[in-house]
Image (cartoon, rainbow, N blue to C red):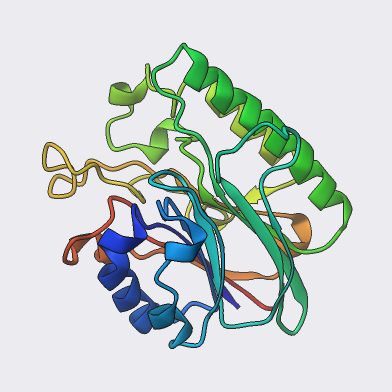
Amino acid sequence: MRIATYNINGIKARLPALLRWLDEARPDVALLQEIKSVDEAFPRDPIEERGYTLETHGQKGFNGVAILSRLPLEDVARGLPGDAADEQARWIEATVIGTRAVRVAGLYLPNGNPAPGPKYDYKLAWMARMQTHAARLLATEEPVVLAGDYNVIPQDADAARPEAWTQDALALPATRAAFRRLIHLGYADAFRLREPGPGHYSFWDYQAAAWERNDGIRIDHLLLSPQAADLLTAAGIDKEVRAGEKPSDHVPVWIDLDA
């Protein structure tokens, strides 16, 4: 079972790029972020024609997440629990039915800039809610995959120029500490299980020729429960997608599970 996460940065603007990647990579499950579309306006037809079931949790012009699956989906849930007043569309989860069931969550974690400030407070509060819910999912003792754009640079090795990010909400000590708390619950960073070294990125800004200079950061992650980590057979980053026509500033990151 290949599960991928991909911040598409606007489904209407990036639909051709998404379709090219789906045709080439053929993931079993794709978790999209920043679809920037309400559910009823999402361009479903070309995706469903490729054999994908589609579940969305959209929002007009901002945020928005989706699950695309070639396998059956059950128990779809929308919205991160813990704050009934939070209207931002940043979380969707479902059970994927393969040879064994895998619970997947697609997330778009808040950016948090400028920090300090209310946006950073919201980011840390959101991460605390995520930790609580991630612990509940862990208690099921089922394979769980938490995948998406975390807007977190976990370590200096995850940035080409770590010194450029020291005051950014993506790399502040409190952000990294919140991410580590997820790991300490018992989750594993899937990509780091396969590739511990530096120089691997999933985002390059559109400005200052960041892509051409490989001035990237790794902020798109798949965290695995122990039961999911036991099934892991491969992990990778589809870096070449960034060189395509009208690309997102993110690229897909994927794992293969023996499921």
Residue drawn at 68 percent across, 43 percent down: 80
Question: Residue 99 falls in which quadrant of the image?
Answer: bottom right
Question: Residue 29 falls in which quadrant of the image?
Answer: bottom right
* Residue with the most extreme front position: 40
Residue 25 place in picture, x, y as percent: 39, 78
Figure label count? 0
Residue drawn at 16 percent across, 66 percent down: 245
* Residue with the most extreme top position: 116
Residue drawn at 44 percent across, 87 percent down: 50
Residue 44 place in picture, x, y as percent: 44, 75
Above/below status of 42 relative to 28: above
**Can the viewer see residue 230?**
no
Residue drawn at 15 percent across, 38 percent down: 207
Above/below status of 163 relative to 158: above
* In-front residue for pair 21/162: 21
Residue 221 place in picture, x, y as percent: 52, 50
Indicate the quadrant containing the N terminus: top left, top right, bottom left or bottom right: bottom right
* In-front residue for pair 210/80: 80
Q: Please indicate whether residue 19 sits to the left or right of residue 236 in the image.
A: left
Residue 123 place in picture, x, y as percent: 55, 27
Indicate the quadrant containing the C terminus: top left, top right, bottom left or bottom right: bottom right
Above/below status of 83 relative to 168: below
**Can the viewer see residue 159?**
yes
